[in-house]
Amino acid sequence: MQQLLNGLFIGSIYALFAIGFTLVFGILDRLNLAHPAVFAASAFVGIELVERAGLSIWLAIPLVLVFGGIVGLVVERVAFRPLKGRPDAHFAGLISSIALAGMVIALLQWRYGPDTRRFPAGSFPDTRLQIAGAQVTVVQVVILVVSIGLMVGLTLLVTRSRLGRGMRAIAENPNAARVLGVDVDRVTATTFAISSALGAVAGVLFAMNVNSAQLGMGTAIELKGLAVIIVGGMGSLPGALVGGLVLGLAEVFAVQYIGSSWRDLIAFGLLFAILLLRPQGLFGARKVRQV
Amino acid sequence: MAEPILVVEGLKVSYGRVEAVHDVSFRADPGSLVTLVGANGAGKSSVINAVSGMLRPKSGRIMFEGRDITRTPAHELVRRGLVQVPEGRQVLSTLTIEENLQLGGWHRGKAAGAAIASMYARFPVLADRRLLPAGALSGGEQQMLAIARALVAAPKVMLMDEPSMGLAPKIVDEVFRVIEEIRASGTTVVLVEQNARRAMRAADYAYVLQTGTVVQSGPAADLLADESIVQAYLGIDPA
Amino acid sequence: MIAQYSATITFIALGAIFAYSFYAVLVAGQLSLGQAGFASVAAFSAVTLGPDPDQVGDLPALLVAIVIGMAVGAIAAVVLGLPTMHLRGVFLAIATLAFAEAVRILLLNQEWSGGAQGMSVPKIVTPAIAWIALAVVAYWFWRQGPSRYGRALAAIREDELAARAMGIDVGRYRLSAFVVAGAVAGLYGVLWAFFVRLIAPEDFGFSTAIDGLVTAVVGGSTMFLGPLLGSGFLTAIPELQRALGVEAGWIRPFLSSVLLLVVILFLPGGLASFIPRRVRMPPTVGEDFGSDHAGLATRLHQASGETVAELVGLSKEYGGVHAVRDVDLQIRSGEVVGLIGPNGAGKTTLVNMISGLVPPSSGRATVLGVTIGRTPAHRVAAAGVSRTFQHAKLFARLSALENVLVGAHLVSRPTFLRRMVWLTSARRDERESLEHAARCLRRVGLGDRATTRASSLSYGDQRRLEIARALAADPSLLILDEPAAGMNHVEASSLSTLIRSLAVDGLTILLIEHNVGLVLETCSRIVVLNFGEVIASGSPDEIAADPVVIEAYLGSAEEDPGGPPNGSIAAGTLADPTAGPDATKRV
C-alpha cells in the first residue's frame, strides 16, 4: 500500500509535467523542449521565494505558477512564433526550444551556482498521516491534491470553455479555426502559458517531494515526460494523466522487486514497446506523422 | 441604389509560387447574390480567401462597408460580419455539432446562444444530433452545419466556397434552397461555384473567371442564356 | 604554446567527428539523436576487447580498437535503425534519444564496463591522429555528396514520397545512413576513450547527445564542411572567453545556446551556408540523340499496342467514402490517355494507386507486369512507371539539374565507392548521367536553367522540371497529374505540343487535367470520372459532344427531376414544393 501511494505521488508529478508537453504538441504539433528547463527553473525560484522573500510555501506555489506562465509566453514568442510557416518548422522548433532551454539553465547556474539547493528547514509541516496502514507526509498529500486539482481544472477548461473549444479546434485544423474567427495566435500563446505554468508547478512540487533542486533535474525528467506522452498518446490529456500514473507506479514497483539501478530503464522500456506496438499511444487517435 | 457592400479592385493573389489571381475586380450590392464561376484552377478560391483575410493579396484593394480591409486578418473580419464557409466544409469533426456552432459564435458571446437555438429550429437534423461529433454527419449534413455555423456569427456578407462540391444532385438542391433563403433574409451572398449553371440560376450577378482574370460578367440571367460561356469555361478556344 | 592548445585542437577534431555522425543522418532528413549511445557502446567494447597497447604497441592497438569500435557502432545502429524504420520526425528523435539514455543506464550497471566509475584508458591519441581521422571522415562525406548515393539521400530529405516515386528504396537508404552514423560515432567513441584517459557512461549522456546535434546544426547539414565549422566555432567560444579573462562557468553554455537560437532563426543552413554551394554544371556538349550510353542502364519498352496497364474493378474507400469506385481501364502502349472529371472525382486517387503510392481497397490492377497493391512504389517505378504530382514535389534545395539526376536514379550506375578512389570509370559514368540529365532538361525547354535552385524557378518552369525529372528514368508509362495547372493559353498550348512529341517518341502517357481544351487536343482517348466512377470513355470528339460530360462539369440548371428526397437534410425548413396546398412551413 505504501508503495502504491508512493507511486501515485511521483506519478501525479510526472503526469502534471507531461501535460505541458502534450498540450503544446496537441495544438501546434511541435515538441517544446524548453519545458524541462522551466520545470527546473521554477524549482529554484520556488526555493528562492521561500528562502529569500520569506514567503510561505503555500503562497510560493501560485506565484511559481504565474512565473511559469510568463516564461511560457516568452518561449512561444521567441522560439516558436517566428518559425510559423517555415517548411522545416518541426525540426527548427525542436532546435530553437533546445536553445532556449540551454539559455535558461545557464542563467540558473549564473544566479544560483552549480550546487544543489534545498528548502530552508521548517518550510513545510512535519506531520505524518496514516492512510490505510501506510505513512504519508502532509507534503505528499498536498502534491497529490494540487496535481489532481490542476489537471481537473485543465480538463474542465478544455472541454467546457470557449478557450478550450478554440484550442481543440486549432489542434484539429488551424485553418478551419481561423476561418471561424478564432484568433489563432492569441489562443496558441495562451496554451503555451498554461502548459508552462503547469510544468512550473510540477517543478516546485518535485522539489518539495525530494527537498532539493539541481540544475540537472530538467533533463532527468525530460525523457520520462516524453515517454509518458508517447505511451499515453501525443496530444491526449487523459493519456498524459494515465501514462504518468502508470509510469510512477511501475517505477516504484520496479525498485521494489528488481532493484533501484534499473528504475530509469522502465520508462524507456515502455516507450520502445509502445512505439513498436501501438505508435499512437494508449489514448491517441492521431495517425503517426509521416514526415 | 445603395452603395455596394463589398468592392474588390485589381486583386492579385499568389498562392505559394503560383500567381493564381492576376487582376480580378467585382462588387456586390447589399442583399444580392453574386456568383463567381469558372473551371477548377481559375482562381476562384484564392479570390475568396483573399477577401476573407485568409490569404494576403499581393496587390489590389478590398473594401467592406466602405472600409479598406485588404490587410485585415480573418478573425477581425468575422467579428465585423464578413464570414466564409470554406471549401470542403471543414467542420471540426472531433468536436460536437453543438461545439461547432458555439465556435461559430466565437465573437458574439452571450448573443450566440439565441442564434444557435434558431439554427436548431431551422435545421432539425442538427438539433437531433447536437451532442454527436461532427464527423458522424454525412456530406450534405456537414454542409448544412458549415452554413449554420457561419450564420451563428450573424454575417452581413457570407462568402461561400463551392458548397456543392462532392454532394449528390439532390442534396445540392437542398443547399441551394438554403442559400436562397439566406439571401432572402437580407444577407449578401458571394457564391463561388464550379456548378456554373445552378449558381447562375440562383444569382443576381455573375462573373466568369478563367486563369485568374474575369473574362465575362453581367446579370446572371443573361450569362446563363449565353452559349459561349460553355466554351470559355471548358477552355476551348472558339473555332 | 602549441602544447597549451594541443588539447583544444584535439577536441575540435573529435567534436567534428561526433558531429559528422549526426550529419550522416541529417543529410537524409532523419533526426536521430542516438549517436551518443553508439559512441558509448563502441568505446567500452573497444577498450575491453582490444589488445593491450603495452603488448602490441600504441598505434596497432589503437587501429584494432578503432576497427572494433566502428563495427560495434554500426551494429548498434542497425539494432536501433530496424525497429524504428517507420518513425519520422519527433517520434524518431524521441526514440533514438531514449536509446542513448538506455545504453547509458545499461552500461552503468554492468561489471565489465566498470559501472559508474568507468574504465581507465591509456592516452594514445595525439592531435595529429585526431585530425587525420577527421580528414578521412570529411573525405568520405565530400565524395558522398555528389554521388548517386548522396543525391538519393538528399532527395529523401527534401521529399520522401517523391524520392520513392523516383525508384529510391527509402528504407534501405535510411538504414545505410544509420549504419554510417553508427560507424562514425564508434570512431569518435574510441578516439575519445584513448584521449581522455577515463571513460564513464556519464560521458555519453543526454547533454553529449544534444551537444553533438547542436554542433551539426550550427555548422550546417547540407554541406560537408558543416560539422567542422560547427565544432571549430563552438570550441572557440571558451577559448575566447579564457583569452578575455572571463571566468564564469555559465557563459559558455549560454553563448552557445544563443548562437544556436540565432542560427536556427536566421541562418537555417548553418555556418556552412556562407560557403557558396558549388552547383554541378552540365557538360557543354552538342545535341546527342541516339548515341550509345554505356553508363546508363537501358530499358526495354513495350511494343506499340501491347497492354501497359490493366485495371479491373479497382476501388478505394476511406472510411465509407468511395474515392474510386469499380474502375475498369486498359492502357495500351503508344496511347495518350486523358483522365478528366470535376473536382473530387477521384482522378488523383486512381493515379496514386496505379503508381503504387496508395494500396487499393479492392479490385485488381497490373501495370507493366507488377501487381498493384502488393508492390512498393519504388518497385513500380523500377518497372517503368514515372509520374509528376498535382502540387509539384520538387527537391527544393537542389538545382534543376540535380533534380533530374535523381530522376535518373534507376538508369544510372552507382558511383560512390569508385569516386572514393577517383577511378576514371566513375568520372565517365557521372559525365554520362550529366549529359542525360541535360538532355532531359533541354527536351522540356529548361536547358539554360540547369544550375538554378528548384525553389527559385517560376511556377511554369517548376512544372516543366517535374516532367524532365520524370522523363529521366526512361519510363514506359508517364503519368502527368495536372501539369497545366496555373498555365495560361499560350503555356498550355506549348505543353500540349511537348506531350504530343513525347508520344511520337514512343512514350505511353496518362494525363490528368482540368483544362479540358488541352485534353481534347492532346489525347487519343479520354476517360471521364465523376464521384469515383467512369461515366464516359471515348475519342475527343465523342467526349466533347457528350451531354453527360458537359453536365458533370457545368452542372444542370434544373432541379433534380426526382423531387425532394425522403428524409431531406433540411426537412421541414422550407415549403415542400411537392406537398399539397395546405402544407405549412415548419418554423
Image (cartoon, rainbow, N blue to C red):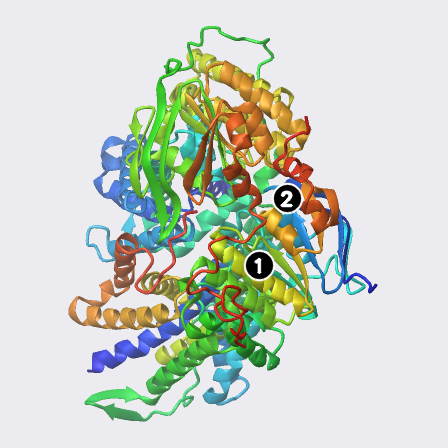
Up-down: is A161 above or below A24? below
Residue under pointer 2 = B38
- Amino acid residing under circle 1: Phe
Up-down: is C466 above or below C504? below
Name the quadrant of the N terminus of chain C.
top right
Percent x, y of residue C551: 54, 42
Nearest the viewer among A137 and A239 is A239
Report whether residue C23 is seen. Answer: no
Percent x, y of residue B105: 58, 73
Residue under pointer 1 = B176
Check if mark 1 and mark 2 are on a common chain. Answer: yes
Up-down: is C546 above or below C84? above
Would you say A216 lies left or right of C227 here?
Answer: left
Q: Name the residue: 30% across, 27% down.
A: C370
Which of the 4 image quadrants contains residue B20? top right
**Sequence-wise first label, 1 or 2:** 2
Percent x, y of residue C481: 50, 34
Q: Name the residue: 28% across, 35% down.
A: C374
Q: Name the residue: 23% across, 63% down.
A: A262
